């Protein structure tokens, strides 16, 4: 870890030694470690100074920054300090989890291929439970999806094919998520600079309500749009499939 004396720290943070001492006196900056008569600062001090400088440039007062950093020091979540914790920290995913032995999971998915388990872990669908290697049991992080894949495997669909589709779908859903979240970010900062933080109760209440409604609208829109897209493509491919079936039937009925 990089260490700094006060002059070096101030230079790296783009401030002055006087400001560094002033922030310490106000409790905004942790006290340095003492080695004899020398004060030693770390990267944590530099990161804190950069936050203070950034907030000052955005128009925050020292008192507001003090309240903000005090909340962080108490262990409060950043969103809680900003009055948005309930909305921001609530996960969008509502997947249920359970625990399953490794043997039961292998039987469910009809595989003993380590690569399949590695993919399931990478996709965030399962997680090893315990220190054993190989694991003796797994936490199923998305019980509904893993169970659905098990039913498809039972009907003869290869797990490798399922996981390939999952990988491609996950990539496309990441693009959808980026679109939705970026739209929400633009809505929050419209008429303000990016990185804006609510400074009053009214602003915090407005931002909380906006994020709540964006969450609802994004979930409903994405879900219903996917359903409509599935309906359209199912109809298209069903017609294509039946056309091939009719063509095959005609070929079979044609006298040889």
Image: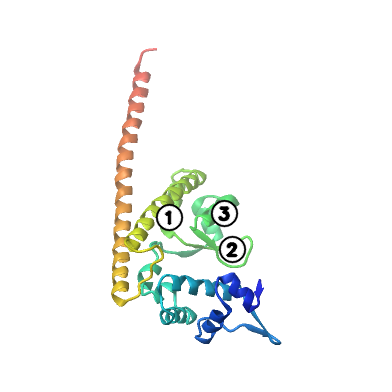
Residue at (41% x, 63% y) in the render: 96
* Res 113 seen here: no
Residue 98: x and y, percent? 46, 65
Residue 240: x and y, percent? 34, 31
Residue identified by numbered label 3: 118
Secondary structure beneath label 1? helix
- Alpha carbon separation for disc pair 2 and 1: 21 Å
- Left or right: where 151 falls relative to 23: left
Residue identified by numbered label 1: 145
Residue 58: x and y, percent? 41, 70
The answer to whether residue 219 is above or below residue 22 is: above
Indicate the quadrant where residue 24 lies.
Answer: bottom right
The answer to whether residue 170 is above or below residue 25 is: above
Residue at (58% x, 84% y) in the render: 31
Indicate the quadrant where residue 237 lies.
Answer: top left
Secondary structure beneath label 3? helix
Residue identified by numbered label 2: 136
Residue at the outermost top position: 256
Residue 55: x and y, percent? 45, 72
- Alpha carbon separation for disc pair 3 and 1: 16 Å
């Amino acid at each position: 870890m990089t260490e700094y004396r006060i002059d070096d720290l101030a230079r790296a943070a783009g401030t002055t030694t006087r400001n560094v001492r002033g922030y310490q006196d106000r409790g905004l900056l942790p006290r340095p470690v003492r080695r004899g008569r020398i004060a030693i600062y770390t990267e944590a001090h530099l990161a804190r100074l950069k936050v203070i400088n950034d907030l000052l440039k955005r128009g925050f007062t020292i008192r507001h920054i003090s309240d903000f950093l005090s909340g962080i020091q108490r262990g409060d979540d950043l969103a809680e300090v900003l009055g948005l914790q309930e909305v921001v920290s609530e996960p969008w995913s509502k997947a249920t989890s359970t625990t399953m032995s490794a043997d039961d999971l292998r039987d469910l998915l009809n595989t003993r291929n380590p690569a399949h388990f590695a993919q399931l872990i990478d996709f965030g669908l399962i997680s090893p439970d315990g220190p054993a290697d190989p694991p003796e049991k797994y936490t199923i992080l998305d019980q509904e999806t893993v169970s659905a894949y098990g039913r498809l495997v039972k009907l003869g669909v290869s797990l490798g094919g399922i996981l390939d589709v999952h990988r491609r779908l996950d990539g496309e859903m990441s693009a959808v998520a980026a679109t939705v979240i970026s739209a929400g970010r633009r809505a929050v900062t419209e008429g303000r600079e990016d990185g804006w933080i609510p400074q009053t109760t009214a602003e915090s209440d407005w931002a909380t309500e906006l994020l709540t409604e964006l969450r609802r609208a994004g979930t409903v829109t994405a879900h219903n749009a996917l359903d409509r897209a599935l309906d359209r493509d199912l109809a298209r491919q069903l017609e294509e499939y039946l056309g091939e079936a009719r063509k095959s039937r005609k070929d079979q009925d044609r006298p040889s």
